[in-house]
Amino acid sequence: MNIKVRDQSLIKPAMRVLLGRGSASVLTLIFLAYIARKLPKTDVALIALHATFVMLAKVISELGLRYCILREATPLVLEGKIQQAVKNIIGPCTWFRLSIALAISLLHLMIGLNCLHLLENTFPNLNIVLIWPYLSVHIFMKSAQAIITPLFFVVERFGTEAFLDSFTGLLEKIFALLAYHLLGISFFFIGFALGPILAIGIAIWSLRDILRYFSYQQYSISRGIQLTKQYWSHFIRQFFRQGMRQFDRILIITMLPTEQLANFHVARTGSSYLKYLIRAFADPLLLRFSESPNPVLRKKLIRSYYLTTISLPLLTALAGPGIMWLLGGAAYMDSWFVLVILCISYIFYALSELQLAIITILGKGDESALLDVLAGTAGVLATFILIYNFQEYGMPWGQLIAFALLWLGGIRTTRELMQSITTQEQAKPFNSV
């Protein structure tokens, strides 16, 4: 199999991703607008709690190995050495991450069963004994979907990955609503958990030309640990840039009453499409940086990234009150300001993701992540202080401060890397632009 990159632009692959994920975001917003009007806020709060667990599981099971695949397997695949890429990089990374995701899901199940009395008192309308195992399955399936995503990117199937992301969201919502109307509110969560299973099957079929080289013999704990150590600084950097947001949400879950937690979930979902938009540009940017050493092209890609990922959060913030009314109706309108600040915070998130892409591809792997650790920790502390003093209205300011600190913490490293790479390219003989 010989795969060649034909197009070095950023916009085209990003648009293919957006066509899929954009439709998924629209479906999510319509779904949220419906359930916010149908379900009590305590039940919406469980959706918010589960969404936090899903995202935290995805971040922890990442282990820096996603970047290992994009950085090391992409050149091999472009040279037609796909079997070698799977044997040495893709297979060991994927198997190891799946085992970690399974362990996290089992831990979630045990925690839920041990905290059963607390959960039943918090969500009195729901059959937690029935629901919780399915939610654990859902965590594993969503993690597995995230684990195989880099495989689509390596072979430039951005549109297919985006379609499957959209399809998964559609199935989740169809099954959840059918179960709710036919069997009751507890089965709403069971239907939601079963949605990704079919989508995972389609994803496996779509990647059959890569997965046919997979073997159980590629699973090696020692190899997984070796690759994780190699990319540990990338994992730490990503964990404190992305994973600490989940700790923010754990604070939110423990500190806010269930009604305010529901308000937060509606506002967060209304702004979360911006995260998908930014990822739609950041992932192709990461791949393009891996493929091309041309500093002029890289600067052009960065300008394209800035144009979209800074302007759209501002436009969404301006429309914040209207979006909040469409999503939640009058019951949630008091929290429109939360949505606006969350939208503005995604400007700094976009800048932070750009830094992560530059450090991942252009760095040597030994760049210090100390500033990322300090910034991520300071962001969590800021969130705690602001929620403690201002409750739900302090939460979005905590996220904005966290993203801004992460961006500030990465400025020096990314600037030095860009200058160093540009100098090296200019010093090469017969260097062509």
Image (cartoon, grey):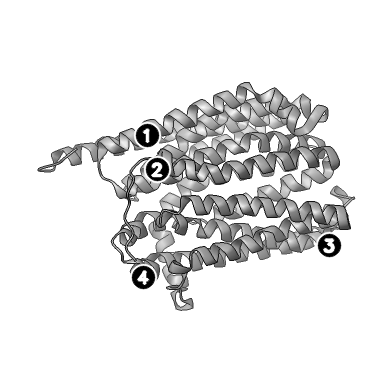
Q: Quick check: marks 2 and 4 in contact, CB under 8 Å?
A: no
Instruction: Tell me the CA gap for discs 3 and 1.
Output: 49 Å
Give residue 135's position: percent from left, percent from top. 73, 58
Report which residue position mark 2 lands on: 285
Give the crowd class for mark 3: few <14, some 14-19, many >=20 residues within 10 Å: some
Give the crowd class for mark 2: few <14, some 14-19, many >=20 residues within 10 Å: many
Which badge, 4 or 3, is on the more N-terminal residue? 4
Q: Quick check: marks 2 and 3 in contact, CB under 8 Å?
A: no
Instruction: Tell me the CA gap for discs 2 and 1.
Output: 8 Å
Which badge, 3 or 1, is on the more N-terminal residue? 3
Instruction: Tell me the CA gap for discs 2 and 3.
Output: 44 Å
Above or below, comparing residue 181 to residue 329 in the picture: below
Which badge, 2 or 4, is on the more N-terminal residue? 4
Q: Amino acid at mark 2?
A: Leu
Instruction: Tell me the CA gap for discs 1 and 4.
Output: 32 Å
Q: Quadrant of residue 110?
A: bottom right
